[in-house]
Each structure stands twice: as structure tokens, then as C-alpha cells.
Image: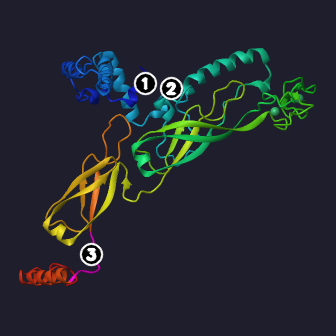
Amino acid sequence: MSQREWIEKDFYKELGVSSTATPDEIKKAYRKLARDLHPDSNPGDTKAEERFKTVSEANAVLSDPAKRKEYDETRRLFAGGGAGGYGRGGGFSPGGGGGFSQEFNINDIFGQAGAGDGGLGDLFGGLFNRSGGGRAATRPRRGSDVETETTLGFREAAQGVTVPLRMTSPSPCTTCHGSGAKPGTSPRVCPHCNGAGVVNRNQGAFGFSEPCDDCRGTGSIIDDPCTDCSGTGIQNRTRTITVRIPPGVSDGQKIRLAGQGEAGLRGAPSGDLFVTVHVSQDKVFGRQGDDLTLVLPVSYSELVLGTTVSVPTLDGRVGVKVPPGTADGRTLRVRGRGVPKRGAAGGAGDLLVTVKVAVPQSLDAEATEALKKYQEAEKAAGYDPRSGWAGA
Ligand SMILES: [Zn+2]
Ligand SMILES: [Zn+2]
């Protein structure tokens, strides 16, 4: 099991124990769950089977003091926003990174296929290649970072979603395999610099190296350029990658995917991909961090007498109790029904319901009569809405 999976999974939650549970408590919780969920007692129940596996997995880590310690530390690191510290590519910060409020390395968390592992292989490949060439121009160079953006629906962003991203980026020309020379021909070594790409010049006591003019520093000359890439050896190629966006991203947030940028030159590691996420508005919900907000239309009498109203949540509905005598504009809090929280802590923000009186534009005779009667009764009872008002 990898660190990535550790970050995604809350083993404590799976076992229904607190993160400070004693080994004994963990053992007890596991035994009970294992008994309840065991495939023998739940034949054909795939859900129970899944849970049984998850619970066993959780127990395997939490019942081993060394593993549990490592697990706790891994998750603590992630919860602290130190995502840059995972795996390869940690600590890299893109140029002009101002305004990245919450940047984290989604790749290291969710394990995009081949990204992290391929990088290491590439790196070694680059080292081996180099031993043969020895020319300045063939030194491996890390691929450039690539930026792209995607727009998510409000609920997708809140709950997490997997999206395909179409990306256009330069990659080696397939016709000439990146050489830039027409198929059947090959670049020849630049005679001026002998393929070094640089020439030495002596000026007084100092020796200078400068890029070779004849080959523009590449070390080779192409007599017959490839027509598909005009001799550059590079073509723009479109590829689609699937990206898992975790729950709780907010509008404008930038996400980093290590190793999904441009391919490195001559076997060097690839650059990173930065995805700026735009979140579209929702008709019902707004967001304040992890809290979900909504405005609930109510009648005056509902506020005075109190009521319970069913309101939507991200995954269903919930009854909100409006206590008698609730002031217009008051915000009622429904705990834990907001946006899922990122990171190890888990849980969700709150749902904030703000009541707003809807005033009827017309009433039938009966209701108007009743309201007039009410108004008189209110006066008779001595209620003055402007008592205590500074403008009275
Ligand atoms: Zn070409
Ligand atoms: Zn040259």
C-alpha cells in the first residue's frame, strides 16, 4: 500500500475509532466489524465484502505500531498543506507563482498513471544516454511546465470529480522522430564546432565559449528539413489525460500534476502540469470556504410561529428547524452538511441557511381581511415594530 492511498483513506473512520484510540480499542473495533462483515455471514453481499476488505486493510496498518506511526505522520504532513513534500518533484515552485493560494500536488496524492515512476526511469535513461554522446547540446533538460484550465460545475467542485483534460503540447515529430531531418536523411555534424554546439574564442588572457553560429548551438546541420515539422523536430500534439479533482476545490485554485507537463529533452524528467480550476455558480448554493450557503424564502408568519423546512443539500435534503420568533435575515447552521473538507481530517463544513421573508404581492380578500385583523390585534397587544429604534 502506497502513501498515496494512505492519504486518501481514513483508516480510523473505517474502524469507527478516534485517531487517539488505544491498540486495545482498535483491536476490539476491528473484531466486531470483521465479525459483522465477514463474507461467510453475508453471502453475496458485495458491499459487505468491500467493507470487509477496507476494514482489514485499516486494521493491518493501525494494529502495527510502526505502520500506524508512519501512517499518522504521512497524513499529518498532508493535512498541514505540505503536499509539495511528497515524492519526486517536491519543492518545485513554478516561476511567478504569486497568487497560488492553495497549490498541491494532486499527482502524488492520486497516483496518475506512470507519472512519478516514469520520472525516475527517465532520469536514469538520461544519464546512460549522456555517457555515449558527450556533446553539450545533448544534455538532458527538464520538460517545461504546462498550464491549462478547466471549468467545473459547482457541485462537481464541492464533491470531487474526474475530468478529462485535452492538452496541446509540443512533442517529438513522429515523421522524423524529432531529428528535424527528412526521413531517409539525417542531420550531419556541424563542421564549424565539430558537433559541440559551442565554439571557443580566445580574447587576451581569457577563453570564451559561445554558441556556434552555423548550427545555432545544436551541434548538427540539417540539409534536408522534415516537411512536417519544418526541421524543428517538434510537433504540437493533442492528448487527453484524466484528472481526479478532489472534493472542495474553490474557484481560481491552481492544482499541480507532477510529471504531466512537456516531455523532457533527451530523457530528462517531464515538466509539471498546472490546472486552474474555475467553478461555475449554482442556482441554489453559494460557498464560504467549506461552508455551503443558501437563502431560504420564508413567510412572516413562519418566522413568528416557527416551522421546519426541507432544504436541499449536496447529496439530498435536510429539514431545517426555524425556531419561533426568528428574525428575518438570521442564519441557521446545519452542521456537517457543507462541502467535504480536503485532507486527512475528513468531515465537511456546515450548511448555512439564511432566512429571508418573501412578501406576497397580492392577497385574496380573505387573507387580506385576516391580516388586517392581525394588525389590529398586534396594535392592541402593544407591539410597536419601531420601539427602541433610534429613528423613532
Ligand atoms: Zn519532423
Ligand atoms: Zn556548429
Q: Position of residue 127 (x, y in %)?
A: 68, 18
Point out the frontmost of discs 1 and 3. 3
Q: Are marks 1 and 2 in contact (CB under 8 Å)?
A: yes
- The reply to whether the residue tagged 1 has its Cβ within 8 angstroms of ligand 1 is no
Decide if ligand 1 comes within 8 Å of the CB at mark 3: no
Classify residue 168 as left or right of residue 352: right
- Mark 2 = which residue? 87
- The amino acid type found where label 3 is placed reads Val
Q: Residue furthest front?
A: 44
Question: Could you tell me how far apart the alpha carbons at marks 1 and 3 are, in whole angstroms?
Answer: 56 Å
**Mark 2 vs 3: CB contact within 8 A:** no
Which residue is tagged 1? 3
Which image quadrant shows ligand 1?
Answer: top right
Q: How is the image coloured?
A: rainbow
Question: Is residue 117 found left or right of 48 in the rendered image?
Answer: right
Say if the magenta span includes residue 140. Answer: no
Residue 292 seen anywhere in this rendered image of the structure: yes
User: What residue type is disc 1 on?
Assistant: Gln
Whether residue 359 appears in magenta in the rendering, the answer is yes
Residue type, mark 2 in image: Gly
Q: Residues within 10 Å of mark 1 (few under 14, many from 20)?
A: some
Ranked by sequence position, the earlier of labels 1 and 3 is 1
Which of the two marks, 2 or 3, is nearer to us in this view?
3
Which residue corresponds to mark 3? 359
State whether residue 54 is above or below residue 64: below
Quadrant containing the C terminus is bottom left
> How many neighbours does mark 3 have within 10 angstroms: few (below 14), some (14-19), or many (20 or more)?
few
Image: 367 above or below 308: below
Secondary structure of the residue carrying numbered label 2: loop
Name the quarter where the N terminus is drawn. Answer: top left
Q: Which residues are magenta?
A: 357-364
82 relative to 113 in the view: left or right = left
